[in-house]
Amino acid sequence: MVPLIAGLAGFGNEASAAGDTVNVTLHKKKMDQFPTAMKNPGEVTDAFDHFQPLEGVTFTPYDVTTAFYAALDEELAKGTDYDDAVKLVVKDFALDPSATPAATGKATDSDGKVEFKDLAKRTAGGIYKVYFFKEDVPADYEEYEGYPTLLVLPAMKADGTTPIEDIHLYPKNKLKNEENPKKELLDDEGNPLTVPTDGYYVYDIGKVVSYKASFTFPSQIGEILHDVGTAGVDQTRYSKFELKDEVSVEGMKFEGISEIWIGGVKLDTAARAALEDKMPITPVNAGPTGPYTGKKAGFTMAAKLNNEKSDGDAAKFGESVATAEFLKKYAGQKIELVYGVSFTNETAVDVKVENDFLVNMEHDGGQADNRENDQTVPGISTGGMKFLKYEEGDKAQGLQGAEFAILKKDGSDEYYLTQDADKKPAWTKIDASNPISQADKFVSAEDGSFKVEGLAKGTYYLRETKAPHGFQLLTEDKEFEVKAGSYTTTALRYDVANVTEGGFLPSTGGMGIVAFLLVGLSLMSVAYFRYRKVQHAAE
């Protein structure tokens, strides 16, 4: 138990001439680690303003005066110094389960506050009372662990003589279960996608695929620790706060962070520039041109925090303090990053790409605290299809030189595919101005194979525009589907058969030529006899 104590300096003080009751307001705040020891001032303070309020926590006050002083007398009987004895009793104090509440329990409001008015200041015998505020955290706040507060009256101002009638206490919370970062794959409208039944989503080369990653800033990201190791030596509580994202395969491009949201508000240009000055972004594979192979696309966004102390490098310590002071306003708020990656012609086709979001932290003298998204993020890939052109009836006989166009259809409209040097696809409607002859040609190799790469999941059509020599042109388009596994799974290879035109065999002799010879001889005989007849008449 780590309670808050008010009025230690006022024990045994008889100078409380104020009224017989006090008002107590508790301010409930979210914290990820307990703050360094500090005496609760008992009055309103801005020291905790950067922490987020915690609504719905129920506090119930109990009068534990008798039990507290009985324990204190026992400790004093051991010869323990008075102040030390009080601290020991407070540290080990436990509420008797049979204790009766001094007032009905109340829950904190949306500002994390709850107030108890007119609590009695003294017992009937004039002894200052001690109140124990039992804390009950709602079931849906499982991640927070509450700690009770022990208030020992009278609560005195800093001068040690003036009593505080309206007491303000700041009981803390500590994260019981560490929050992990969240990550989602988004559709074109910005909605999260679930894992598809066929394993992963398939996109075109060049398509920007968007993600949203989020994490809550530590509540004490802006805290400065005092008396670290040596009296008077300061150090920022957090020495590292880094957001890191990286895809699982090489050859992809990082398209940048398009939006940053904090606390549900999108940062404008100026606010984003200020944040990136303290948390610069280092992209990987973000250039307009490759090569993209050899590195994995992603980014690192790291706060300029370090573990330097005030008695060390002044410049480094100053930078860490300035960063902590800047980030303090975002403490306990969720940061959301919307960013994109895309496939390039260097990305392996039909290989599932996974993507993890990591948060790496160090605090309190170098304690490492590294976390990663714990939910399943759908995988992605770019797709394609492999084909085999062969002679009908003999798949072992590939056919070289067949030319094809790839089409998409929308009702009666047809669109042909062209790909630029980076294999980014473009689709053009076939019409008089854009004949299919302008489509990219996919030509079968010597073994009859050819392929198309870099396409999204969908239904496409293969149209033969030129048949191999001696074979008939296909009269119908061949429908095929690009999906997860369609490119790498041999069983899904699309086979395209062609029928021969039939050959022309030259003649090697036969009755055909004999007939021509006979006709020729007959004509020659007729001509000869006519000639003889004319000659005979002339004589």
Image (cartoon, helix red, strand yellow):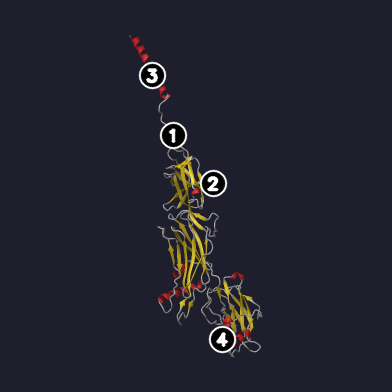
SS class of the residue under badge 4?
helix
Q: What SS does tag 1 mark?
A: loop
Residue 525: x, y in percent?
A: 38, 16
Residue at 55 percent of width and 70 percent of height: 177
Residue bearing the label numbered 2: 411
Task: Give the residue type at disc 2.
Answer: Gly
Residue under numbered circle 4: 85
Circle 2 — which element?
loop
Q: In the figure, 12 relative to 307: above or below?
A: below
In space, the residues marked 1 and 4 are separated at their CA atoms by 112 Å
Which badge, 4 or 2, comes first in the chain's sequence? 4
Q: Nearer the viewer, residue 349 or 413?
A: 349
Q: Which residue is mark 3?
A: 521
**Amino acid at pointer 1:** Gly
Residue type at mark 4? Ala
* Cα–Cα span, label 3 and label 4: 146 Å
Whole-number angstrom distance, CA of label 1 to CA of label 2: 40 Å
Going from N to C along the chain, the mark reached first, 1 or 2, is 2
Q: Earlier in the sequence, mark 2 or mark 3?
A: 2
What residue is shown with label 1?
A: 503
